[in-house]
Image: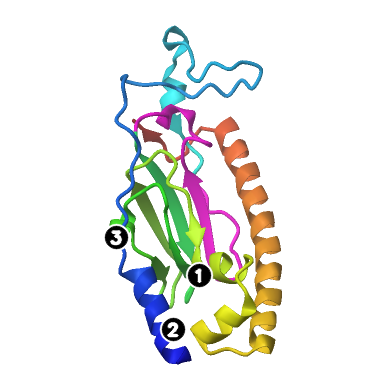
Amino acid sequence: MSLTVAVLFAVLLHGRVTLASDPDPVRDFCIANTDSATNIPCKNSSDATVEDFIFSGIKSRGRFSETGLASIPVNVNSFPGLNTLGVSLVRADFEAGGVNVPHFHPRATEVAGLVHFQMNVGDKPATILGSFDSENPGLMKIPAAVFGCGIKEELLEKAFGLTAKDISKVRRKLTLVLERLKAVVRFSIHLIKINLDNASGNINTIL
């Protein structure tokens, strides 16, 4: 019975195609206003500069997580010039054997909206640049979504054929990984700010 449920659960995860994207833009550009003191969503077009459309925060990799992945997302939160353009990027670095765990993007159609993952099967570090059809694609990691929420242990036991002890062990490890991931995110944000202040010699992405 548990095997049947597990198979059904996998089909539900992988068999559903989600089509998601940003609404069509109604203007050529709308540089996100980062001034929290105002409620104006876009920077005045007369104040736009070339720098608003240059991002130089991906010249260096971020800090590796426990899974051997270091990623730097380039979305509207870190690059305001992407606002309403419906595009974003990510730099992902992998150690040998590094893994980007199964995940999906709720506001983008990478791999047709299916659950997917990446793994470096080589014996040397690897770097990829990914692109999305959304200025803010979002990220939902399956391990955290399944074991890091309030799903009852009884359901997880039947779905994955695990014991209560196994599930508790997974959740303890997941908590530790999430804490370390938060530290990695904080470091990556700090690195992006440093790179923005020192654009000389950087890899520039110009729209």
Residue type at the position of mark 2: Ala
Q: Identify the residue at the far top of this view.
A: 46
Residue for badge 1:
95
Q: Position of residue 63 (x, y in %)?
A: 60, 58
Residue for badge 2:
6
The secondary element bearing badge 3 is classed as loop
Q: Residue at x 51, y 41 (%)?
A: 57
- Image quadrant for the C terminus? top left
Residue for badge 3:
17
Q: Residue at x 47, y 39 (%)?
A: 202
- Measure the C-alpha gap from mark 2 to mark 1: 31 Å
Based on the picture, tell me whether residue 79 belongs to the magenta stretch: yes
The correct choice, above or below, for 2 with respect to 83 in the image is below
- Measure the C-alpha gap from mark 3 to mark 1: 30 Å
- Measure the C-alpha gap from mark 3 to mark 2: 19 Å
Q: How is the image coloured?
A: rainbow
The answer to whether residue 129 is left or right of residue 179 is: left
- Image quadrant for the N terminus? bottom left
Q: Earlier in the sequence, mark 3 or mark 1?
A: 3
Q: Earlier in the sequence, mark 3 or mark 2?
A: 2
Q: Which residues are magenta?
A: 60-85
Based on the picture, tell me whether residue 55 belongs to the magenta stretch: no
